[in-house]
Amino acid sequence: MSGVGKGVAASSIGKILQARGYSVTAIKIDPYVNVDAGTMNPTEHGEVFVTEDGDETDQDIGNYERFLNVDIMRDNYMTTGRVYQSVIQKERNLDYNGQCVEVVPHIPQEVIRRIKKASAKAKADFTIIEIGGTVGEYQNILFLEAARMMKNETPDMVKVVMVSYLPIPLNVGEMKTKPTQYAVRTLNSAGIQPDFLLCRAEQPLDKKRKEKLHIFCSIPVDHVISAPDVDSIYQIPINFEKEKLSLKLLDEFKLKARKKNLEDWRAMARRAAIQKPEVAIGVVGKYFATGDFTLSDSYISVIEAVKHAAADNKVKANLVWLDAEEIEKKGTGVLKDLDGIIIPQGWGSRGSEGKIKAIKYAREKKVPYFGLCYGMQMAVIEFARNVAKMKGANSEEINAKIAYPVIHIMPEQQELLKQKQYGGTIRLGAWPCKLKKGSRIQEIYNKTRVSERHRHRYEVNNKFRSRLEKKGLVIAGTSPDNQLVEAIEISDHPFFIGTQFHPEYKSRPLAPHPLFVEFIKVCLATKL
């Protein structure tokens, strides 16, 4: 089922193989016809993760980067749309030499070509390939066919791990294996027999359940791996190693462990498990609701960056989800018990006034504030309105017909919008940033030049920069040519920083991002 944990399972397998001395990369295959994840609604699909080279990808790519502590590039992400687009373009270019181009075998062959290219480019000993969706869906059957073809061609070099959920119905009180049995048979119908079963459940798998799956799924009993719920996803590699999964995988490939080096990860997981002291961090956004439920996956990189920083500070961060539209309607009362406020990425006008109210509260009440991308833009608008007295100041994204468009669209972006070129056209990937000497952000980085990832179409309007600076807004970071504002801050405040870039994309559990580390440190120091 969706959300069962394939992404963190793939990441964890990569981590434990890495800890045994092998180089690892990871590939995500999404069954969507979308060419990339950039045009998808985050409440439907979760966060869009941006790679160093500017690809808009599924959030699992972020998990791979965080677990493996490596940059995953554009070649490691594919969708149905991307694969078909390539095949059609090749056909138009006569690359198939006049053949009748067919869904099978040409689509699976293109998938395999992409896998091999990404593996070679990464110079990896192991490539972990995650196929999105669930077994039995027609959307991913061609990717399963590619897996079948690869395994048939080189059985000693390709192994299949299936992640399946074992429910424990409340009124029954017994873990049920039948859904997994049927899932394995459905995978068999695609011509694939799994080599390992990762059994997701609320509780650890017992011996009886393992033996049942061994008998009915034709899988060695020691290849049926228990994957129970854990408090932190960073405990998963440690859980896998309790069953010696890395050694069992290596044995399948007839390889030996080169070393054993998971200690830094274990130490990090212990820090992440700390329960006290606590800081309450409010995340003000609008991509939460999915029916009657809350979807935090829309901001998963921010969540993980906060967790990394909290562990580094030896505190627990309690995230409080706050709907910007509710703040618009009911005011800022919900903010009074917070130790810090984050406003992350976003688009459009919905909830913008609620975000501006929250920023005004943080600025005036001296509550640590961290604005990310849209959160920086909203901070500039709030400052323009309430400090620089630029009445009605706003973003052109929200209202183009205003006297003070302190946030405006980049000229080249305007042309793209006129031509309806939306997908993959915004400012993406890693860009250099020059930091102002003596600024707070420069002191935190302890550098004057950094490189950070971007995902935006609108910028601070240079026409109003000097007026804002005269009133106390510090332009703390710019592009090297000084044309684009990359970071702002307010000096007489415990922590008031906004970045046009996304530092959360580069935060890793073993290398927390310094801006988040300092933010949590100040939240603890100023705690009410």
Image: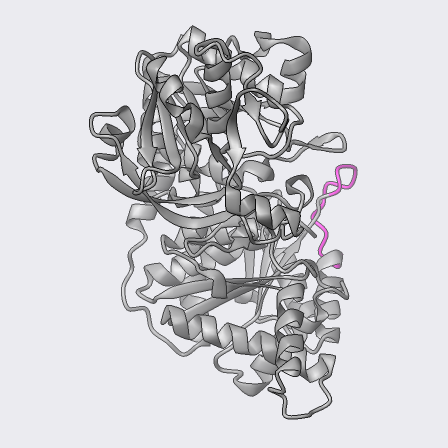
Taking 407 as reference, is 203 above or below it? below
Residue at horizontal 58%, vertical 34%? 346
Give coordinates of residue 442: x percent, y percent.
25, 31
Q: Nearer the viewer, residue 444 or 461?
A: 461
Quadrant in which the C terminus appears: top left
Splitting the image into 4 quarters, where does residue 322 fall?
Answer: top right
Residue 174 counted in the magenta span: yes
Characterize the magenta stretch by its predominant secondary structure.
loop
Q: Which residues are magenta?
A: 169-178
Taking 460 as reference, is 453 above or below it? below
Q: Nearer the viewer, residue 352 or 474?
A: 474
Q: Which of the colour schemes (rainbow, by chain, secondary structure, one colour) is used?
A: one colour
Question: Does residue 169 appear in the picture of this structure?
Answer: yes
Residue at horizontal 21%, vertical 37%? 447
Give coordinates of residue 462: x percent, y percent.
42, 30
Splitting the image into 4 quarters, where does residue 354 fall?
Answer: top right
Question: Does residue 277 appear in the picture of this structure?
Answer: no
Give coordinates of residue 227: x percent, y percent.
55, 51
Q: Nearer the viewer, residue 23 or 412?
A: 412
Splitting the image into 4 quarters, where does residue 93 fall?
Answer: bottom right
Residue at horizontal 64%, vertical 41%? 42
User: How many discs appear?
Assistant: 0
Residue 149 counted in the magenta span: no
Give coordinates of residue 264: x percent, y percent.
29, 47
Image check: 307 left or right of 203?
left
Image check: 16 left or right of 31?
left
Residue at horizontal 67%, vertical 76%? 88
Image check: 181 left or right of 249?
right
